[in-house]
Amino acid sequence: MRIILFTGKGGVGKTTIAAATATRTAQLGHKTLVISTDAAHSLGDSLDVKLGNSPTKVSDNLWAQEINVLEEIAVNWETIQNYMATFFKSMGVDDILADEMAILPGLDELFGLFHIHKADRSGKYDCLIVDCAPTGQTLQLLSMPEVARWWMQKFFPVERKIAKTLRAMRKKKIMSIPIPEDSVYASIQELYDNVGALKEMLTEPSTTSVRIVLNPEKIVLEETRRAYTYLNLYGYPVDCVIANRILPDEVTDSYFSSWRKSQRRYMNKIENTFSPLPVLQSKLMRSEIVGQKLLLQLGQDIYSRQEPTKVFCNQRPQQIIKDKEAYVLILKLPFVKKAEVNILKNEHELTIQIGNYRRDILLPSALSMMDVDKAALKADELRVTFFKGE
């Protein structure tokens, strides 16, 4: 199944572009599901169709869905939530506050992403289009699988051993604190398995791509540059950039002359900045884009005769190669200066921090047993070399 995620600064027209892509893809005969993970849904408004938490058939080959995070938490977190709430209450926490504390930050984003895995397993669709939240929330969204995976690998095995001991103590009436039963750990294990499968799916460039939508303006361009850097940091492949609301040639009114000059200047910057990524263009339409007819026109305008589901640029943001007796971890990091990068190896993981964003990479066993020999940032690539110490 082809997976395409759309993100961009708030207000650039991301949802409209995602809906237009889905409409065009469906017209070409691909069974397409378009979903919104944005808490402030507008996908249904764009399609002019009422949507819910389950896929709704919009037209031939096209289904759409707006994810309800409260329903998702109830389905995926109930067993664990009930235990955590009981634990907090046993510690004297107020009932309402205990229920709130049992829902961890970021779960809504994580469970929203689970629908990607669910759609793939269903086998019903050829293509999945994801209308993500604006850039900042999207980066948080896409970091959640790795964060959750790290937490479970670090905490889960130790916690389970402790729980077995404490359950034995409870039987002897030594302890009154509620200890998690095996059903809780079974739910955690299922969650861990889903997170692992999701991470692998979203970082495979042959099937999954992120497309960044922007307008040819200074502030938008700067945020898009940062987004592209952080998407590469987390290992998510970007296959193209889509410049939206470009003034068409038929607009010749002198009132827009300054806008036209500005757009041309920034379009040159965009193409130079993101090369070799292709930059597709979406012109400013005559009216508001609402409904499938206008969305289809927009989709045809963006992709012309190209297949919307094609991988426009197949770049792997992260890879490991062997160099004689050493291994080299290569991570694409465009627009980053050497002074901005901090690296730390700690046992089985490599921590990379750039600005406010940090990634803890769980290393393969072959690398975790080695030492870091050197790290170099050159030509938009971070190369970390590992060697086996004496």
Image: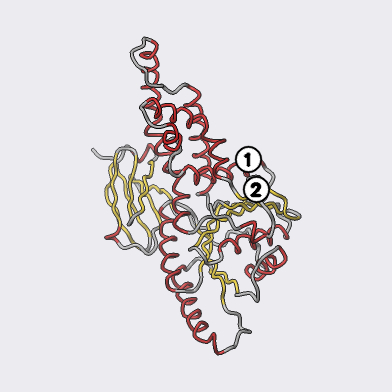
Quadrant where the image shows the C terminus: top left
Q: Which residue is mark 2?
A: 52
Q: Nearer the viewer, mark 1 or mark 2?
A: 2
Q: Quadrant of residue 129?
A: bottom right
Name the amino acid, label 1: Arg
Q: Which residue is mark 1?
A: 121
Asked which quadrant contains residue 153, the reply is: top left
Q: Residue at x 50, y 39 (%)?
A: 195
Which residue occupies the foreground of this view, 220 or 266?
220
x%, y% of residue 143? Answer: 44, 48
Element assignment for label 2: loop
The three-letter code of the residue at mark 2 reads Gly
Q: Residue 60, how many percent across, how many down?
A: 76, 55
Number of residues whose C-alpha sits closer than 10 Å to that of mark 2, classed few (under 14), some (14–19) or many (20 or more)? few
Q: Which mark is residue 41?
A: none
Residue 21 located left or right of residue 232: right
Residue density around tag 1, few if under 14, some if 14–19, many if 20 or more, within 10 Å:
few
> Which element type, helix, strand or loop, lies under badge 1?
helix
